[in-house]
Every structure is written in C-alpha cells, then in structure tokens.
Image: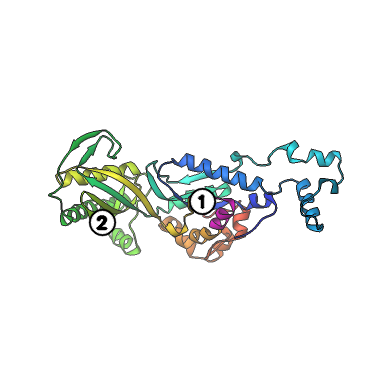
C-alpha cells in the first residue's frame, strides 16, 4: 500500500474504476456518500497547503518531537495560507463517483464504481454486457405484495409437496424458455449461419442493452425447506425482476414464495475477491483497488461483441489508446483524456 505525505498528490491519483462490496441496508446513494466522506477525511488529514508542507520539512530537519510554529517566520503569506484561514482544501462534492448497475436497498454484493475520469470507462463496461451472477435466497409458503418477507402478507400456503427434483425441473424450464429468445435479442435468426457463428464464438449476448432480462443459467445450490437458494446468471436484470422470479417459481410449484436475500457474487470479471469491505473504504485502499482492477479493463476482456473485437486485430491500437494487453497503465489512469475504446 502506497503512503502519501501530500494531499493533492493523492487526490490526483484517485481516478479510475474500483469495486466494493455493498452491504444490505443502505441504498447505493448512501454508500456513495459514505465513500465521499471517507475520502474527504483521509485527504484533508494530509498536508494540503504549502504552509503545512514547510512545517513538515521543519519537523523532519529538527530533533524536536513536535513542530514549533515559531521555527517559521510569521508573515502575511504564511497566515493567508493557513488551514484555519482557508478551511479544508477538499469537500465531499469534489469526489465524482458513479455506480454501474446499482443494487437495491435489500441487496448486497459486488458494486463497480467509477471515480473522476474513470466514470467515462463505465460506458464501455456497460457496452461489454457482462454476465452477472447472483445468489438469490427464497422461502416457500409465503406470499406478500412486494415478494419480500417485509411486505404485506397476502397468503400462506403449504410447501411439503415441493422436492428438490421438482425445483430443479422448474429452474431448467425457465432457463430453456430464455434460451429460445437469445438469438432474437441478438438480432439473428436461430436457424441461420450467423446464429451458428455467434454461438460458436462464445456467449450469445443481446444486440443492445434495452432488451428484457435474459437468464443464462438457473440452478438450485441449496435446498432446505422452506428455504432455498438459486444461482442465477443473467443480463439486463434488476433486483425487482429477481424477486418476481422467485415468486413465479413458487407459483410453478403450486405454492408461494418470497425473496429473502439477493447477493451479487460476480459482475463480469469483477468478483468478490476484488471487492472492498466497508472497513476498507479508505483513500489508500481505494487507490490500491483502482490499480488492481486496471487489469480487468484490458481490451481483451472488454471485447465481447463484434463492435469492439476489431480492436484486438492490431497491437498498435493498444498503444494509441494508452493501454497495454495487461490492462490500464498508471500513465493512462493519470492522463484521463484518453478513452478506453474508440467510439
């Protein structure tokens, strides 16, 4: 972890994309407020004015344990640059943060955030249409108005007839139904040569981001009646859709179900191991996370569609963009005026 003794130097480096683990409870905008407050606190704790830096140098050159203000000449310039005169150099509004595909209040998991000039990278990450993986917990026997256990109870039903094979059959049917529409959302006919080429090249992704939710995988990973957990791989989904899906699963099994928890465990190449916990939402940890996540933003990993795959044909385009095959470089993060992909 890099150590800094000058606030503006740390502020200039805080630009890029990082990943956190959003806990259950606070909404995304509240999480961003907490991060802004922590960044503002950490940077203002460092010397931010020239007068403070001169005091720091005097402290380093003397054997005194505490710096003495009398060791510097007291003049109008020193007093004009004092923190008590100017106030804090940075305020929370100076830190520009923008989330990518946020989570609801009752959901938790991986959340990708752009900071400063890194916000312009979020558009290219969204165009990559990454696959997102969720662990969704449900409970049979309840029916509420908003498919959550905290909603108004509408009905209580029995669930003793539900078995894991029956649940697996419903999950497989739901996945098969969504598979039929993948080629339609991709803009090709399912019986054409384009569809075969598209399927052979990898995951069939929608042509644009305005399609209905697509479930690429649904399976039960835990079954302990009345509770169960589904692992869902999806694109263009929202937390409300996942909650409604749990309710539909209960109805398909001639019962009812509510969604008790939603946890995003992966967003494309961003996984739980890359996410910062709440106690790590500090300036130094976020800076380290920006540098570690730069390898996840290489053109090789963002080229998931034909519109950007041509960038991998010529190695000179990497140098023109300011990115290497290993990911973002420190100069590219610091430059800010270079874009990750050409539009």
The mark that comes first in sequence, 2 or 1, is: 2
- Residue range (magenta): 278-290
Residue 333 seen: yes
Left or right: residue 160 versus residue 305 is left
Mark 2 and mark 1: Cα distance apart in space: 30 Å
Q: Nearer the viewer, residue 234 or 89?
A: 89
Q: Nearer the viewer, residue 292 or 125?
A: 292
Left or right: residue 168 versus residue 115 is left
Q: Position of residue 336 (x, y in %)?
A: 60, 51
Q: Position of residue 311 (x, y in %)?
A: 49, 61
Is the residue 143 above or below the residue 315 in the image? above
Q: Position of residue 80 (x, y in %)?
A: 80, 38
Label ID, residue 123: none
Q: Quadrant of residue 77?
A: top right
Q: Position of residue 79 (x, y in %)?
A: 81, 39
Instruction: Describe the element under mark 2 as helix, strand or loop.
Output: strand
Secondary structure character of the magenta stretch overall: helix
Badge 1: residue crowd in 10 Å (few <14, some 14–19, many ≥20): few
**Residue behind mark 1:** 279
Quarter of the image for the N terminus: give it.
bottom right
Left or right: residue 198 versus residue 280 is left
Can residue 287 be found in the magenta stretch?
yes
Label ID, residue 222: 2
Residue 209 seen: no
């Amino acid at each position: 972890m890099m150590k800094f003794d000058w606030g503006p130097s740390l502020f200039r480096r805080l630009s890029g994309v990082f990943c956190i683990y959003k806990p259950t409870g606070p909404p995304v905008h509240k999480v961003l407020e907490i991060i802004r407050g922590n960044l503002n606190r950490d940077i203002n704790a460092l010397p931010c004015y020239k007068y403070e830096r001169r005091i720091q140098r005097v402290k380093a050159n003397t054997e005194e344990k505490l710096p003495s203000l009398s060791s510097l000449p007291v003049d109008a310039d020193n007093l004009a640059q004092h923190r008590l005169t100017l106030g804090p150099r940075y305020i929370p509004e100076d830190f520009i943060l923008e989330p990518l595909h946020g989570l609801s209040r009752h959901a938790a998991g991986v959340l990708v955030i752009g900071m400063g000039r890194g916000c312009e990278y979020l558009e290219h990450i969204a165009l990559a249409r990454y696959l997102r993986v969720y662990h969704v917990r449900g409970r049979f026997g309840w029916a509420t108005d908003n498919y959550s256990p905290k909603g108004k109870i509408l009905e209580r039903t029995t669930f003793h007839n539900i078995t894991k094979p029956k649940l697996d059959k419903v999950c497989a049917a739901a996945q098969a139904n969504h598979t039929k529409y993948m080629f339609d959302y991709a803009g090709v006919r399912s019986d054409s040569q384009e569809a075969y080429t598209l399927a052979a090249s990898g995951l069939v992704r929608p042509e644009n981001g305005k399609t209905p939710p697509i479930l690429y995988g649904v399976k039960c990973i835990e079954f302990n009646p009345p509770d169960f957990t589904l692992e869902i791989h999806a694109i263009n989904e929202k937390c409300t859709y996942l909650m409604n899906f749990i309710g539909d699963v209960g109805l398909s099994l001639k019962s009812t179900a509510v969604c008790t928890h939603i946890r995003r465990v992966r967003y494309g190449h961003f996984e739980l191991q890359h996410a910062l916990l709440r106690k790590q939402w500090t300036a130094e940890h976020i800076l380290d996370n920006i540098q570690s996540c730069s390898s996840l933003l290489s053109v090789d990993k963002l080229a998931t569609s034909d519109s950007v795959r041509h960038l991998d044909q010529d190695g000179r385009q990497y140098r023109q963009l300011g990115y290497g095959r290993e990911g973002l470089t420190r100069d590219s993060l610091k430059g800010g005026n270079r874009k990750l992909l050409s539009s």
